[in-house]
């Protein structure tokens, strides 16, 4: 039976419950646009917070696994030429690694759009699985077509599914510190290029090629798992949508600034992978032992650790176009002035270190340039579009260089000229593209 004050008691009880619930709700994080006074599609503030820096960590690990593994193409190129595929020409063997680079970079045109719709995790998990499966099956390959399927296709699809979300998520998390954050994360590819060749070589000498490759697979599995757990998105994603090919991939190229920039990046990628891919075989041709030649890849990538962090910091302070132009011009000049005439141990080792440092910015800075001229909800798709164009340069660059080497009877001067001119000219065109940015905004 209810007393005369029961209604009042009920009201007090309900009020207390509401108040206590409000207290609980206020103690929970509220990463919603209304609370933070952000745009409707944003969840968190840029350039700050634990989630942002966890994304840097996760991207570092993911890029170590994906692009870091790609960075050791020179190791596999030299190993296959001396062992399983010794009956094939350098140009033919280079198609394995060129396809690997092509698919990983070209995949951005699709994966970038999928990222804009679904966010990072639905891409990272299947990417990790495919990448590890591809590496493990590479360890048992013996025939040319098997290497194409396992390393050239399966591994590279997985690497693309891991790499592209790392870059896109980080580009959205940071605005003022974007180039620096990307530079830190992309050093993962450099450290991968340092650690993976040494690790492969040591285990291969003791236990054979199969266990050398499988050891890399287990390491990559662990690091990619960290990426899956730590990479999140700063914005709300739209979910499944139909892809408007014209709006997504054609309209951006109507802006002269975007088209000119993409042209320059294409030329940079045309020359970039030639020294990376051929420096071990070039060194062997000039008296290096097989073991020492493989360590050149580690030297190159060790130097590029600093070449990716420092230019990123400088780019945010002194201009991203200026930094990119200077790095590409220096890379091209080193290729022409040092690698081209180099025949002894000292100049070749010096080239590996200097090229690694200056070429680092050619990979780490351009996503920041693309993000700078792109709407935030289209960053993934536009970085993917640039990657797709650049992938054709990566696909054709090394086979062209291999054909030049074959035509020149094993001499590398023609390949060095091709690489050096492409790097310098591409960086110059990207620098010129900033003039069109002002016209597009006018």
Image: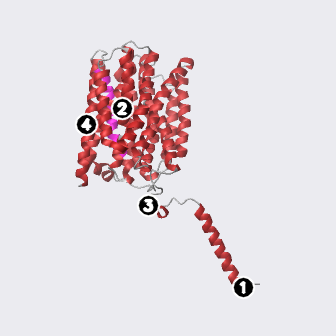
Q: Disc 3 or 2, which lies upstream in sequence? A: 3
Query: Which residue sits furthest front?
Result: 317
Q: Is residue 389 magenta?
A: yes
Q: Position of residue 218 (x, y in %)?
A: 56, 32
> Of helix, strand and loop, which one carries label 3?
loop
Which of the 4 quarters of the picture holds residue 331?
A: top left
The magenta segment is 382-404
> Of helix, strand and loop, which one carries label 2?
helix
Q: Is residue 305 magenta?
A: no
Crowding near the residue tagged with mark 3, few <14, some 14–19, many ≥20 C-alpha atoms within 10 Å: some
**Could you give the CA–CA distance between mark 2 and mark 1, rounded to whole angstroms?**
80 Å
Look at 50% across and 23% down and name the residue there.
198
Q: Position of residue 231 (x, y in %)?
A: 50, 46
Which of the 4 quarters of the picture holds residue 271?
A: top left
Q: Which residue is mark 4?
A: 428
Look at 44% across and 15% down and name the residue there.
290
Mark number for residue 359? 2
Crowding near the residue tagged with mark 4, few <14, some 14–19, many ≥20 C-alpha atoms within 10 Å: many
The vertical placement of 370 against 356, above or below, is below
Query: Which residue sits furthest top?
Result: 287
Q: Which residue is mark 3?
A: 38
Magenta span: predominant SS is helix
């Amino acid at each position: 039976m209810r007393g005369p004050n029961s209604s009042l008691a009920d009201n007090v009880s309900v009020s207390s419950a509401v108040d206590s619930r409000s207290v609980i709700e206020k103690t929970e994080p509220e990463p919603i646009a209304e609370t933070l006074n952000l745009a409707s599609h944003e969840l968190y503030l840029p350039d700050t917070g634990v989630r942002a820096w966890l994304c840097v960590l996760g991207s570092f690990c993911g890029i170590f696994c994906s692009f870091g593994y790609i960075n050791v193409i020179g190791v596999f190129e030299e190993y296959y030429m001396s062992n399983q595929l010794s009956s094939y020409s350098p140009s033919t063997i280079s198609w394995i690694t060129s396809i690997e680079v092509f698919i990983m970079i070209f995949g951005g045109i699709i994966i970038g759009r999928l990222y804009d719709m679904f966010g990072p995790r639905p891409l990272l998990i299947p990417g990790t699985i495919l990448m590890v499966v591809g590496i493990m099956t590479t360890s048992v390959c013996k025939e040319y077509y098997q290497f194409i399927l396992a390393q050239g296709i399966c591994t590279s699809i997985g690497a693309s599914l891991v790499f592209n979300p790392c870059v896109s998520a980080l580009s959205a998390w940071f605005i003022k510190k974007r180039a620096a954050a990307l530079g830190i994360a992309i050093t993962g590819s450099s450290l991968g290029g340092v650690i993976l060749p040494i690790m492969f070589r040591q285990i291969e000498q003791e236990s054979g090629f199969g266990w050398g490759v499988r050891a890399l697979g287990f390491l990559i599995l662990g690091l990619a798992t960290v990426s899956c757990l730590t990479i999140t998105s700063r914005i709300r994603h739209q979910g499944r949508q139909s892809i408007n090919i014209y709006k997504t991939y054609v309209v951006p190229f109507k802006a002269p600034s975007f088209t000119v920039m993409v042209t320059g990046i294409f030329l940079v990628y045309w020359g970039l992978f030639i020294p990376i891919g051929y420096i071990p075989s070039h060194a062997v041709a000039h008296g290096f032992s097989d073991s020492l030649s493989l360590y050149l890849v580690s030297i190159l990538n060790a130097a590029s650790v600093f070449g990716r962090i420092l230019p990123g910091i400088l780019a945010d302070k002194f201009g991203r176009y200026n930094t990119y132009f200077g790095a590409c011009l220096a890379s091209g000049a080193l290729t022409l002035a040092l690698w081209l005439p180099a025949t002894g141990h000292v100049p070749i080792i010096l080239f590996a270190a200097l090229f690694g440092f200056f070429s680092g910015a050619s990979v780490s800075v351009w996503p920041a340039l693309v993000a700078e001229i792109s709407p935030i909800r289209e960053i993934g798709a536009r970085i993917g579009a640039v990657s797709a164009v650049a992938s054709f340069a990566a696909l054709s660059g090394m086979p062209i260089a291999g054909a030049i080497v074959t035509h020149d009877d094993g001499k590398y001067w023609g390949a060095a000229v091709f690489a050096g001119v492409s790097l310098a000219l591409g960086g110059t065109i990207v620098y010129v593209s900033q003039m069109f940015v002002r016209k597009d905004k006018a």
